[in-house]
Amino acid sequence: MNEILNAIIARRSCKNYSAEMIPRETLEQIIEAGLFAASGMGLQCPIVIAVTDKNLRDKLSALNSKYDFKHREDPFYGAPVVLAVLADKSVDTGLYDGSLVIGNMMLAAHSLGIGSCWIHRAKEVFEDEEGQKILKELGIEGEYEGVGNCVLGYAAEARPAVIPRKENRVFRVY
């Protein structure tokens, strides 16, 4: 099977990570894959905040937990890397463009042997006063909306099996 199609079919969300850090070169490849995602009108409006600093990572996790209805202690499942994706609010396709960025990064991570998971609530985190403060401290100016977090790391357990796809999801008109 084609390498890309295989990655699409085999990739699964990882929800248990080892503490081992991903090599910087590998992380940069994953980020670059995200930056090459398709974007409406080629505007490339999403930005990526790549976090490997444990203090900031833990602060983002705590903020995320604040908006998590399950109130998990670490909604990032112990992943040592967080790639927060935000989109320019003035771009109509920003949410979609940011989603493609995350999708590309998850597939790239899988292809490089790195576990990943999309974690929601980036919108709430970066609308929060503390989230706004983080953006300001990072020198990020403008009106951005959190799209999602792509957490990365080495899987601490085997990847789950591929489950069958639901029936009746395609309506063909050839």
Image (tube, grey):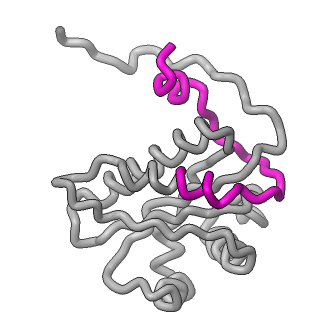
Determine which quarter of the picture holds residue 144. Answer: bottom left
Residue 101 place in picture, x, y as percent: 41, 52
Residue 6 in magenta stretch: yes
The residue closer to the viewer here, 33 or 124, is 33
Residue 135 place in picture, x, y as percent: 48, 84
Residue 90's place in the image compared with 29, above or below, is below
Q: Would residue 129 be visible to someone looking at this image?
A: no
Q: Residue at coordinates 21% horizontally, 53% vertically from top-left?
A: 40
Q: Residue at coordinates 47% horizontally, 51% vertically from top-left?
A: 102
Q: Residue at coordinates 46% horizontally, 68% vertically from top-left?
A: 123
Q: Would residue 165 be visible to someone looking at this image?
A: yes
Which part of the image, by quadrant, shows the C terminus? top left
Decide if residue 13 is on the left or right side of residue 145: right
Decide if residue 39 is on the left or right side of residue 58: left
Q: Residue at coordinates 38% horizontally, 71% vertically from top-left?
A: 145
Residue 151's place in the image compared with 159, above or below, is below
Q: How many marks?
A: 0
Residue 5's place in the image compared with 72, above or below, is above
Residue 66 in magenta stretch: no
Residue 143 place in picture, x, y as percent: 32, 80
Q: Residue furthest front?
A: 25
Region rendered in magenta: 1-29
The residue closer to the viewer here, 35 or 156, is 35
The residue closer to the viewer here, 79 or 22, is 22
Residue 67 place in picture, x, y as percent: 60, 69
Q: Residue furthest top?
A: 174
